[in-house]
Image: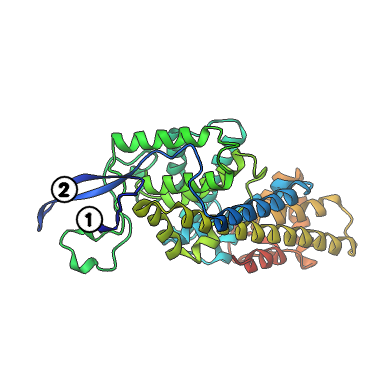
């Protein structure tokens, strides 16, 4: 890490870390520990205040649209799969969006899909805990990280705060440095007691009521910076950190339903994203970072709202196809709802969700296939999975 980047205004301290290399011998370097978050707003320029206000307006429009839906939770899983794909891509785990939407939850075909679908399970577990009234805690975050890393090579080292040192990224001039740790773009807090204290402080800060003092969009940006800078886990920090943005907005009442997908916007601007986070650590540049963060939330909210409206339109369109057919069963309309809420599903899923016999579910699926509403993912597999092509089309064309 280039220690010359850190100005006297940096909101934290550089602490000495030491280690050994079998070839290079003992080394000594520095790691950055951020100071606890302030209880007041950082100094922001008028341009940033305007960006924050625009983000609040876009989030309010998204929330209002969601509240008008007969079943606001209907669109949670589709948006979660989109978020899972983009947030994982930011960390180097990529699978095509269409594969993510049609993947089998119980038997992901690739290691990449395992991690991506783990994110969906982790987010669902986190949202459920928050909805059930469980307070955010270090224990909860550790458990969620364990879910995220299940079935991966790092599973045994997961589900708890890291106790060792990690480094983030690689410097552009890495070839000129002697020790590998010096080649890192950023070196976060050492593991152990200092990291535990930092995480407890962050969780306490997120649970505190900052209304009337710190705008919720600013508070979400501040807590996101702190989490990413502490980098508390061996892996999965970026994914959990971006998940916490939505949790924070939900807990402060900005969003009633956590359908916001933030990662697609950040994914297309990853270099700027990382630069702005680093800018806070090195020169206390909250203003540039929070302006960038607010702009991201505004555009993410607008894209998510557009996608929500488009999915509701498709839902109505598919039900019109049923009304124009000889099919009259109410369960056919219920199956359309299921196909919108679940990008891919089995006949067993239809049986359980609709409360009908397997034979009836199988016949119903076949009837909607004949109408062109549904199609099969892979007809050659033993357990056939179905999807609605029009739903997949809407989900795949939404862009940040």
Kindly identify the residue that appears in the image at 30 percent across and 36 percent down.
Answer: 194
* Of 357 and 171, the residue lying toward us: 171
Kindly identify the residue that appears in the image at 51 percent across and 59 percent down.
Answer: 292
The quarter of the picture where residue 183 lies is: bottom left
What crowding class fits label 1: few (fewer than 14 Cα within 10 Å), some (14-19), or many (20 or more)? many
Q: Position of residue 226 (x, y in %)?
A: 42, 45
Residue 282 as seen in the image, left or right of residue 89: left
**Residue at the disc numbered 2:** 19
Q: Position of residue 148 (x, y in %)?
A: 46, 47
Number of disc labels: 2
What crowding class fits label 2: few (fewer than 14 Cα within 10 Å), some (14-19), or many (20 or more)? few
Residue 240 as seen in the image, left or right of residue 322: left
Q: Position of residue 102 (x, y in %)?
A: 60, 61
- CA distance separating discs 2 and 1: 9 Å
Q: Quadrant of the N terminus?
A: bottom left
Query: Against 78, is 134 above or below?
Result: above
Q: Quadrant of the C terminus?
A: bottom right
Kindly identify the residue that appears in the image at 29 percent across and 52 percent down.
Answer: 187
* Of 68 and 57, the residue lying toward us: 57
- Tell me if residue 230 can be seen: yes
SS state under label 2:
strand
Tell which circle, 2 or 1, labels the residue nearer the N-terminal end: 2
Query: Against 199, is 63 above or below?
Result: below
**Residue at the disc numbered 1:** 181
Of the numbered discs in the image, which one, if any, rests on residue 147? none
Q: Position of residue 147 (x, y in %)?
A: 46, 43
SS state under label 1:
helix
Colour scheme of the picture: rainbow
CB under 8 Å between callouts 2 and 1? yes
* Of 81 and 68, the residue lying toward us: 68
- Tell me if residue 379 can be seen: no
């Amino acid at each position: 890490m280039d220690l010359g980047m850190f100005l006297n205004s940096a909101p934290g301290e550089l602490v000495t870390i030491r280690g050994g290399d079998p070839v290079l011998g003992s080394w000594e370097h520095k790691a950055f520990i951020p100071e606890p978050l302030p209880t007041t707003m950082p100094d922001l320029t008028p341009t940033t205040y305007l960006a924050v206000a625009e983000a609040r307006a876009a989030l309010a429009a998204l929330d209002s649209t969601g509240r008008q839906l007969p079943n606001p939770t209907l669109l949670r899983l589709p948006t979660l799969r989109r978020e899972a794909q983009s947030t994982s891509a930011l960390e180097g785990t990529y699978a095509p969006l269409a594969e993510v939407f049609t993947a089998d939850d119980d038997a992901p075909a690739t290691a990449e899909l395992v991690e991506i679908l783990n994110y969906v399970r982790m987010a669902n577990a986190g949202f459920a805990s928050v909805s059930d009234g469980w307070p955010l805690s270090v224990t909860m975050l550790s458990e969620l990280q364990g879910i995220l890393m299940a079935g991966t090579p790092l599973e045994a080292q997961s589900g708890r705060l890291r106790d060792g040192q990690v480094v983030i990224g690689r410097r552009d001039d890495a070839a000129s440095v002697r020790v590998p740790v010096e080649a890192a773009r950023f070196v976060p807090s050492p593991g152990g007691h200092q990291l535990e204290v930092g995480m407890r402080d962050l969780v306490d800060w997120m649970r505190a009521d900052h209304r009337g003092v710190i705008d919720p969009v600013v508070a979400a940006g501040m807590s996101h910076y702190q989490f990413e800078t502490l980098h508390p886990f061996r892996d999965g920090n970026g994914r959990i950190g971006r998940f916490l943005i939505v949790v924070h907005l939900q807990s402060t009442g900005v969003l009633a339903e956590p359908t916001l997908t933030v990662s697609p916007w950040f994914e297309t601007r990853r270099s700027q994203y990382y630069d702005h986070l680093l800018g806070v650590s090195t020169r206390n540049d909250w203003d540039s970072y929070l302006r960038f963060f607010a702009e991201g939330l505004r555009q993410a909210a607008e894209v998510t709202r557009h996608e929500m409206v488009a999915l509701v339109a498709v839902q109505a369109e598919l039900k019109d196809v049923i009304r124009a057919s000889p099919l009259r069963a109410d369960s056919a309309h219920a199956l359309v709802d299921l196909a919108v809420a679940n990008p891919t599903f089995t006949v067993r899923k239809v049986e359980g969700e609709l409360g009908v016999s397997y034979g009836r579910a199988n016949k119903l699926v076949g009837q909607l296939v004949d109408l062109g509403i549904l199609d099969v993912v892979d007809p050659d597999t033993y357990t056939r999975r179905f999807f609605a092509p029009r739903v997949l089309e809407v989900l795949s064309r939404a862009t940040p």
